[in-house]
Image: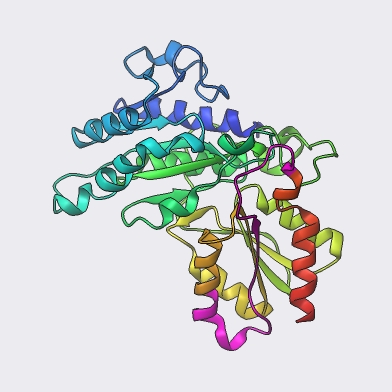
Amino acid sequence: MPRKTMIEAIRDALDVSMGRDSQVIVYGEDVGFFGGVFRATQGLQAKYGKSRCFDAPISESGIVGSAIGMAAYGLRPCVEVQFADYVYPAYDQIVSEAARLRYRSNGDFTCPIVVRMPTGGGIFGGQTHSQSPEALFTHVSGLKVIVPSNPHDAKGLLIAAIEDPDPVIFLEPKRLYNGPFDGHHDKPVTPWSKHELGEVADGHYTIPLGKAAIRRPGSAVTVLAYGTMVYVAQAAAEETGIDAEVIDLRTLLPLDLDTIVASVKKTGRCVVVHEATLTSGFGAELVSLVQENCFYQLEAPVARVAGWDTPYPHAQEWDYFPGPARVGRALVETLEA
C-alpha cells in the first residue's frame, strides 16, 4: 500500500471526490493555480479545469457565503480557508446560514459544504497562525467537526465529509502535515513514509463520522485526545511508563461517546488533552460527559491539559504547547489522586 503525507492524502481525497462527482468543486485563497499555501490542491486545476478548482478573492465571508449558495443549488463545494485563524469573518455565514439551512427550510434545502482549514501550532506561527478554534464550531447545532490525526484517516474522513449532506468543518493539524509530532521539538520527526498510519489506499474509501479509534490500549487511565495531541499523549504514556489507553476522537461532532464511556468505565480515570485554550475548550464538554456517564466508576477527578488562556505566543511556543512533560504530570497526578 502506498504511503503519503497528510497533505498528499488530502489532495488524493479531493481528487477522488472530484473524479467521482462532477458537482464537487474546490476553491479558496490561492487554491487554484498555486495549489494552496500548503499545496493541498496542487494539480487539481490543471486536471479538472478552472471552473471546478479556482482562486477566490481574499474574503472568507465571500468564500463561505458563495459556497452556501452553490450548495443550495445542488453543488458540493469544498472550500479552503488558508488558516483557521482567518475563519472569523466567515463565522456568521457558517453559523447563521450553513448550519441552519436544513432546519429553517424544513428539509427543503441542505448545505453539503466542507470548510477545510489548517489548525493548531507548533510551527512558530505566532498568535495569528496557530489557533485551535474547534470549540467555536462544536457549540453550533447543525455542524459536524472533524480533526484527523494521520494521512489514512484524513483521506477517508474528508471523502466522507464531502459526501455528507450537511456542512462539515474539517480542521487539519498543520504540525502533522509531514509527519507525526510527539511534542519534542528538539528531536527529528518521523516522516509519514515510515509510519504505519501513512499507508493510504488508492481510490475511494470512507471512514464513518462519529467513530473514534483506540491508538494505544491500556488499563490504568483513559486519555482523550485529537489531532496532534494524540501523539503527545502516546509519548507521555511511554515516557512515564503508565498503562494509558489513548483514544483518538477523530470527529468531535458527532462524538463517539460509546467508546469513551467503555474505556473510562474500564480504567476508572481520565485525562483530556487538547491544544486550544483551557477555558471553554472542547475538553470541558468531554469532562462533563465523562462525569455524567461514568461517575460511579471514576476513581479520581477528570484532569485537563490544554493551552494557556492567552494568545498563542511566538517566543514561548513550547511553553504554551501542551507537551509530553505536562501530559505526563497529569497522568501521574491522576493515578495518585
Q: State yes or no: residue 302 in magenta.
A: yes
Q: How many marks?
A: 0
Q: Quadrant of residue 335?
A: bottom right
Q: Is residue 199 visible?
A: no
Which portion, as a residue range, is magenta?
290-317
* Residue 161 rendering spot, x and y as whole percentages: 41, 43
**169 horizontally vs 6: left or right:** left
* Residue 337 rendering spot, x and y as whole percentages: 75, 82
Residues 199 and 221: in front is 221
Residues 41 and 336: in front is 336
Rendered residue at 53%/66% (across/down): 284
Q: Quadrant of the N terminus?
A: top right
Direction bottom: furthest residue: 296
**244 horizontally vs 42: left or right:** right
Rendered residue at 61%/80% (across/down): 265
**276 horizontally vs 315: left or right:** left
Q: Is residue 197 above or below residue 296?
A: above
Q: Quadrant of residue 269?
A: bottom right
Q: Is residue 166 visible?
A: yes
Q: Is residue 239 above or below residue 61?
A: below
Rendered residue at 48%/56% (across/down): 252
Rendered residue at 21%/47% (across/down): 101
Which coloring applies here?
rainbow
Q: State yes or no: residue 96 in magenta.
A: no
* Residue 150 rendering spot, x and y as whole percentages: 62, 43
Q: Quadrant of residue 222?
A: bottom right
* Residue 18 rendering spot, x and y as whole percentages: 39, 26
